[in-house]
Amino acid sequence: MKPPAFEYVRVGTTEEAVAELARDGEDTKLLAGGQSLMPMLNMRLAMPRRLIDLNRVGELEYIREREDGVAIGAMTRQRAVEKSALVARQVPLLADAMPWVGHFQIRNRGTIGGSLAHADPAAELPAVAVCLDARVTVRGPEGSRTLTSEQLYRSYFTTTLASTEILTEIWFPAPPARTGHAWLEFARRHGDYALVGVAAAVTLRDESIAEARLALTGVGGRPTRARDAERRLVGRRGSDAVLEDAADSVRQTIQPASDIHGTAEYRRRLAGTLTVRALRLAIERAGRAPSRTT
Amino acid sequence: MTPPEIAITVHVNGRSYAERVPPRLLLSDFLRHHLGLTGTHVGCEHGVCGACTVLLDGAAVRSCLLLAVQTDGAQITTVEGLAGDGERLHPLQEAFREMHGLQCGFCTPGFLLTAVELLRDTPHPDDLTIRRDLAGNLCRCTGYQNIVHAVRRAAELMGRR
Amino acid sequence: MTTRAIGARIPRNEDPRLLRGHGCFVDDVNPADGLHGAVLRSPHAHARIVSIDTSRARALPGVDLVLTAADLGEVNQPTPLLIPNPHLTYPRTPRPLAADEVRFVGEPVAFVVARDRYLAEDALAAIDLTWEPLPVVASVEAALAEGAPLVHADVPGNRAARMAQQVGDPAGALARAARVLRERLYIERSCGSPIEARGVAAEYDRRAGTLRVWVSTQAPLPIKNGLARIFGLPEFKVDVIAPDVGGGFGTKIMLFYPEEILVPFAAIRLGRPVKWTEDRREHLIAATQERGQRHDVEVAVDEDGRILAIRDRFVHDAGAYTPYGIVVPIITSTQLPGPYRLRNYAVEFDVVYTNTAMVTPYRGAGRPHGAFVMERVIGLIARELSLEPAEVRRRNFIQPHEFPWDVGLTFQDGGPTRYDSGNYPLGLELALERIDAADFRRRQAEARRERRYLGLGIGCYVEGTGIGPYEGAHVRVEPSGKVYVATGLTTQGQGHHTTFAQIAADALGCDPADVTVVTGDTRKFNWGAGTFASRGLVTSGNAIGIAARKVRDKALRIAAGLLEVSLDDLELTGGAVRVRGVPDTALALGALATVANPIRYAYGKEASEAALRLVKPREGAVLAPGEEPGLEAYAYYAPPQATFASGCHAAIVEVDIATGDVKILRYVVQHDCGTVVNPTVVEGQIHGGVAQGIGGALYERIVYDDQGQPLAATFMDFLLPTAMEIPEIEIIHTETPSPLNPLGIKGVGEAGAIPVPALIAEAVDDALAPFGVRVREMPLNPSRVLELVTEGRERGRGAG
Ligand SMILES: Cc1cc2nc3c(=O)[nH]c(=O)nc-3n(C[C@H](O)[C@H](O)[C@H](O)COP(=O)(O)OP(=O)(O)OC[C@H]3O[C@@H](n4cnc5c(N)ncnc54)[C@H](O)[C@@H]3O)c2cc1C
Ligand code: FES
Ligand code: FES
């Protein structure tokens, strides 16, 4: 299990990276944390001719408060996000999900940008981004553009990025007042990609649900937003029946696949169960959340 | 054709090495076969078993998922560098021996280096924390119990020093 | 040293080296000028090789050699059949490289040697093959179907073997019985997967004509002798070394693996050292695997739950070849009765070829399957008669006064299946007490009211261990006073460097830390078999004990002569012989070793002083006839038959009926392996065994699709449990020494793994009893657990 031969280019700035990509984007791979790309190279499932190493692009490594939200540079290590007090305060859902990404040694190297760009439908970060309507910035030969995280994902391991584009930043909005979050997932072993994961964000007004956001992993080719379930929740109180109704919608709308770790039917049931549990937890946390963000 | 070799300087266990390496050379192979530091073991080469764990600028990482060229200028600690030169073992090594935390010893270097970061982050960990942070390392011999006890014991020993 | 070394919890001699990263595993062996090998493996489960063209690969820079079947010539014979058996009517073993047909994904087709492994793997991609795919049988069901394609064209019905054994009159008892219960049970494929995969390095010295091979193996001696024959070399010119071995679990015992021939072949051909290190994907598709059986069992039972007869028919999946014979199903069939009085028993099995990886013993070696069947039968009876499973066990146990107990079957080693000693009822009660079974039903009922589902599971086993043929030992006291012990078998984590040292130290009255043990090096010890079947401590341990006592006797004899006292007046303690009660007469073992060698050039001050002080003017030859120089001895131990260890595990699990998750809340092990030499080491063996058992029950599964493609070929899919999945294990030691060997030892290497699937099945059954769930298969994943709940509910609805 050894990687195929490739050329190695180390860049120091985003601009250089974009220029290198523009020179020859085909058959070239960006190397971020390498925690997904390197196994694929070792197994020769990927055979790029050229690697562009982003690990010295310091300008892409940051966590900043911006426009009532938090902006994170693509090359920020997952471990840094996990430990960030700013993230814990302003994007609690991301903080909640972070420890579930692999193991701490993986997160020491793995990056936010790599995880988003890898587009594994079982990965936590894409679902968190989709749940919160995070915005992604990408840069190519023609300059920068911004897209919603839902627009980023096409299908299994495929984004809408052009081969000459680099994902540079993701921006998460801070939650409205009286919002609670929950990330729940079920994996075969601790640290594995989840069979199903659920991100929930619920905002309360008085005792009822003013806004609900739900996104799932492992139930289709991309992180899946459960819009119908969200609609069914709005304006209602979080009773068992209401949560079950949302879970019903989830079970009906998703299209999971079977594999050796679980049948499609199992994933459907699991999605329902985790939806109820995540919503319940989010509502409970919303009830305790301050009525105004600080 | 074959891409050119690249010159790198890496500081391993306090010693500097200047070498030329092919771009695709894995850090694990570089340490083991170029530098002869065979204490770093390889169990899967796809990031799951943790046997190849080393400290890269102080952080525990999989050396099978890094290219040697990426570590140009970096500080690396392998199991050979844990105890220093003296007779004395590192408290983690002592604790592993005392608690029978190793059998075949193949996974052990990875566990030791993982535990270094674990105890640096959490000097007084409870068992759940230990188990959670060790979950990225596979052992086929011990059933983990004595490894968990060894890390707990090392925390005691280190607290005392 | 007044305390006995045997039974002491001493830290291990091997640890400091391993902890510092100074171990030496095969891939750490780096002979100068060495080359690296890679194996081209079949991507097809069954196909004919139409053509193979290696010219592009040979032309690549850095490539030194490309071998195909044709290049191997005479060497490419089918590898030896290790354990022939008359019932194995169609044995088939693989060739080092497939010649015209491949029979499983991963079967070696070509071998490349290059400057490094990277280039070698590049060259694999440049070998051009044309395949003609053949129809595949990927499961025993497919293999046994009417008109099924044949794995081996000349093996009708894909049936390698059929064997039957019986005691008493099972047919009669079944016919007469008022109650006969039946069940079909499955246990699926798994594998050992040590963290160090396999590896081979070889070096051939053309001038001396010597071949030296390092193999990550459990049995270097048979490999050495085999290689000598294959390459036409004298045995004394071949050395095989198993250096540090990173776990074996049975996977490293199958011999010959193709690479064990290919690597030396290439080294001889090139006159340069060659090394091949198995990667994880190769290990998971092409190293040997195990489990994989389907049982149809019938049990006749009386109104009190006493078993009157059992008849079991099973199919054993052999994979594509049978290099290890039919040992695994024989063990299953003979160990199935476990700790129970079973006077009428019939068992019959078919061994079936499939287009999957080869099957050879993996920790437990057929026993987990047998225990699963037997313990499921206990559960079946319990449910039928509304009894506690523990109670059914009590009513059927062999009683302590009934030993030796003859099961009445021929065991794997051709000897009797005769239990030497044990106390099964006591084991059960100890385990139940520790897990607080008396109070469990109350807690279970309470939890159910909160919709939490707790279950108690028990698993009992008897394990035939310590089988022959034999092992040997060489024990020598050096003039330094340090003791050197060599034995032929290997160590792969079992702590032999410590336990063997304890046995020698116990006989020699010295500190175990002063004893250095060498294993797995044919240069140091040239006789024996290897480490498998929980036999190491019984066979080598006893051989070392015997040899060490010979050395002790010689030391006493020499000392008696020097001190001019009678033997009876002497004692050997603290590494010295002395006249009882006269401390200043002490003669250190090292001094005696010096005197024992008539060429006593004084190597060092102490030695010369000892020689000057002790040696008297002599008459006649320096060595009396029959006398040998040195303070050393060789000894061998061949067990008369297997010795039978036993145990009882109990656990409490909680099943989440919304996710299917099975969480182990408590796990208790009672075990009896006779005399315990080092409790710490024994506990370690048990922890590891249980963890592997839990892996096999809830996480690990080798899966093939219907085209024989392996679907669990990485550690992302073959799920070894982590520290988060394995609970704390509480251990109760009971010691019923074996009457069969001098030390009273029984084996313990595999014990931990054996009853786990049976126990988990019983615990899940118990937890999900409200849904009428009955577990009939292993392993279980959460997805399957929920299916069982659904099926149970639907059945309940149908019935109600
Ligand atoms: C044992 C193990 C367990 C894991 N478990 C999980 C888990 O449970 N959940 C989970 O989410 N992940 C898991 N991972 C994957 C891990 O989170 C990866 O870090 C992540 O998926 C990829 O991030 P990376 O920085 O390592 O990217 P890389 O591996 O370097 O790159 C991944 C892909 O993204 C592309 N890419 C990287 N950065 C950019 C960029 N800025 N712009 C455009 N393209 C880019 C690369 O070209 C490549 O195609 C696991 C990994 C391992 C080895
Ligand atoms: S060898 Fe690197 S994680 Fe297994
Ligand atoms: S001690 Fe052998 S793998 Fe951990």
Image: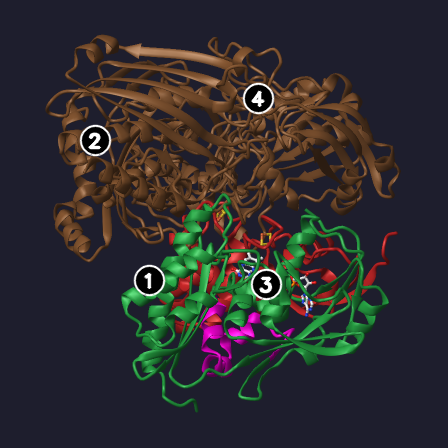
Chain colours: A green, B red, C brown
Q: Kindly state the secondary structure of the residue where label 2 is placed.
A: helix
Q: Can you say which quadrant of the picture contains the C terminus of chain B?
A: bottom left
Q: For mark 4, what is the residue? A: C321
Q: For mark 3, what is the residue? A: B61
Q: CA distance from mark 2 to mark 3?
A: 48 Å
Q: What's the residue type where badge 1 is placed?
A: Glu
- In the rendering, at what x and y percent does residue A287 appear? 32, 80
Q: What's the residue type where badge 2 is placed?
A: Tyr
Q: Residues within 10 Å of mark 1 (few under 14, many from 20)?
A: some
Say which of marks 4 and 2 sits in front: 4
Q: Report the disc number at residue A244.
A: 1
Disc tally is 4
Picture layout, residue A24 above or below residue C92: below
Ligand 1 quadrant in view: bottom right
Q: What's the residue type where badge 4 is placed?
A: Tyr
Chain identifier of the residue bearing label 4 in the image: C
Q: Kindly state the secondary structure of the residue where label 3 is placed.
A: strand
Q: Are marks 4 and 2 in contact (CB under 8 Å)?
A: no
Residue at x 38%, y 33% (from the top left corner): C563
Part of the protein shown in magenta = A72-99
Q: Are marks 1 and 2 on the same chain?
A: no
| Of C743 and C139, the residue lying toward us | C139
- In the rendering, at what x and y percent does residue C253 appear? 53, 29
Q: Is mark 1 within 8 Å of ligand 1?
A: no
In the displayed structure, does residue C571 sit left or right of residue C412?
A: left
Say which of marks 4 and 3 sits in front: 4
